[in-house]
Image: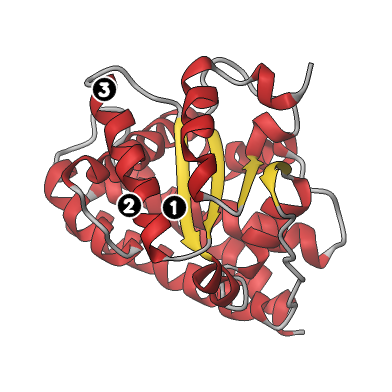
C-alpha cells in the first residue's frame, strides 16, 4: 500500500481535487514518516504555478472545511506559488522547509529543491526568541494565554529542528517529545492541546476567505481565544516560558558560534 492510499478518506479526496491546480504536492509530518496515529494531522505543502491556481486551491480548502462544519478535519494545508515558495525557503523558515521536504513524500508533480542555508539558523532562532519573549509578556499581563501556549510550542519545535540540523542528526519526534516534557513537565500535554486548538482556529479562518500573514492571523486569533486557561496557572506557565527561552538562547549561541 502506498502512503497516499493509507491517508484518511477526506485527505485523499482533497488531494485528488487539488491536483489539477498544483505543480507539486508534498506530504510531511508523521504521515510521511509512517508514524501517524488517529489524532495526527495530514500536513501538506501545495505549490501552484501561479496566483490564480493558488486561489483556486484555497477555495477548495474553504469548501472542505465548510462541509465538515464542526467536525474536526485533520488537514493542515500550506499553499504557495512557485515564486513565493522559492522566496520563502531562502528566509528564516529555511530550516523548517528543508526538514519538511527532506523527510516528506512527493505525492504529485515535480520534486521540490530545498537546499539548506545554514546562515539562516541564527536569524530563525532570534525570531523565535522574540516570539517567546512576547509570550512571556502575555503571561505576565495575564492576557492572550492561549496564544502564549501556541508561541511557546512553536518556538520549542523550531529551535529543536535547528538544533538537529546543526548536529547533523535525524529529526526524531520522540526526542522532541522528551524535550517538551523536560521543559513543560506535567503540563506538556495540556500546552500541546492548546497549541492544536489555536492551530485549528487559525486554519479555519479560511472559512471566511481570509488571506493573512502569520502575524495578521495571530492578531485575529487573539480576539477569539483571550480567555483564562483552566489547565495551568500563570506562575507555572511563566516558568515554562522561561525554560523555553533559556533553551532557545542556548541554541542561538550555538548557531552564532
**Type of colouring:** secondary structure
For the residues labelled 3 and 1, the Cα–Cα distance comes to 32 Å
Q: Which of 78 and 224 is in front in this view?
A: 78
Quadrant of the snapshot with the N terminus: top right
Residue occupied by mark 2: 148
SS state under label 2: helix
* Left or right for 141, reference 189: left
Q: Are marks 3 and 1 in contact (CB under 8 Å)?
A: no
Q: For the view shown, which residue lies furthest in the right direction? A: 168
Quadrant of the snapshot with the C terminus: bottom right
Q: Say which label, 3 or 1, has the lower sequence index.
A: 3
Who's the residue at 39% across and 40% down the image? 195
Q: Say which label, 3 or 2, has the lower sequence index.
A: 3
For the residues labelled 3 and 2, the Cα–Cα distance comes to 30 Å
Total numbered circles: 3
Determine whether 127 is above or below 5 in the image. Answer: below
Residue occupied by mark 3: 67
Q: Nearer the viewer, residue 116 or 186?
A: 116
The quarter holding residue 43 reads top right
Q: Which of 186 and 76 is in front in this view?
A: 76
Give the mark toward the camera: 3 or 1: 3
Amino acid at each position: 500500500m502506498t502512503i497516499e492510499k493509507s491517508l484518511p478518506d477526506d485527505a485523499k479526496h482533497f488531494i485528488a481535487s487539488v491536483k489539477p491546480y498544483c505543480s507539486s504536492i508534498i506530504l510531511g509530518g508523521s504521515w510521511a514518516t509512517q508514524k501517524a496515529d488517529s489524532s495526527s494531522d495530514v500536513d501538506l505543502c501545495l505549490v501552484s504555478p501561479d496566483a490564480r491556481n493558488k486561489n483556486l486551491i484555497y477555495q477548495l480548502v474553504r469548501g472542505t472545511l465548510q462541509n465538515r462544519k464542526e467536525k474536526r478535519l485533520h488537514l493542515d494545508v500550506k499553499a504557495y506559488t512557485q515564486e513565493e515558495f522559492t522566496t520563502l525557503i531562502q528566509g528564516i523558515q529555511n530550516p523548517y522547509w528543508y526538514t519538511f521536504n527532506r523527510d516528506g513524500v512527493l505525492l504529485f508533480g515535480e520534486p521540490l529543491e530545498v537546499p539548506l542555508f545554514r546562515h539562516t539558523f541564527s536569524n530563525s532562532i532570534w525570531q523565535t526568541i522574540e516570539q517567546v519573549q512576547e509570550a512571556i509578556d502575555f503571561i505576565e499581563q495575564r492576557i492572550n494565554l492561549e496564544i502564549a501556549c501556541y508561541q511557546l510550542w512553536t518556538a520549542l519545535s523550531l529551535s529543536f529542528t535547528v538544533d538537529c540540523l546543526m548536529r547533523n542528526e535525524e529529526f526524531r519526534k520522540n526526542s522532541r517529545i522528551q524535550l517538551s516534557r523536560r521543559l513543560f513537565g506535567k503540563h506538556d500535554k495540556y500546552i500541546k492541546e492548546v497549541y492544536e486548538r489555536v492551530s485549528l482556529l487559525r486554519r479555519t479562518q479560511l472559512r471566511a476567505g481570509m488571506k493573512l500573514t502569520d502575524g495578521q492571523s495571530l492578531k485575529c486569533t487573539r480576539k477569539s481565544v483571550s480567555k483564562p486557561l483552566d489547565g495551568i496557572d500563570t506562575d507555572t506557565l511563566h516558568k515554562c516560558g522561561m525554560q523555553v527561552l533559556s533553551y532557545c538562547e542556548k541554541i542561538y549561541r550555538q548557531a552564532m558560534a
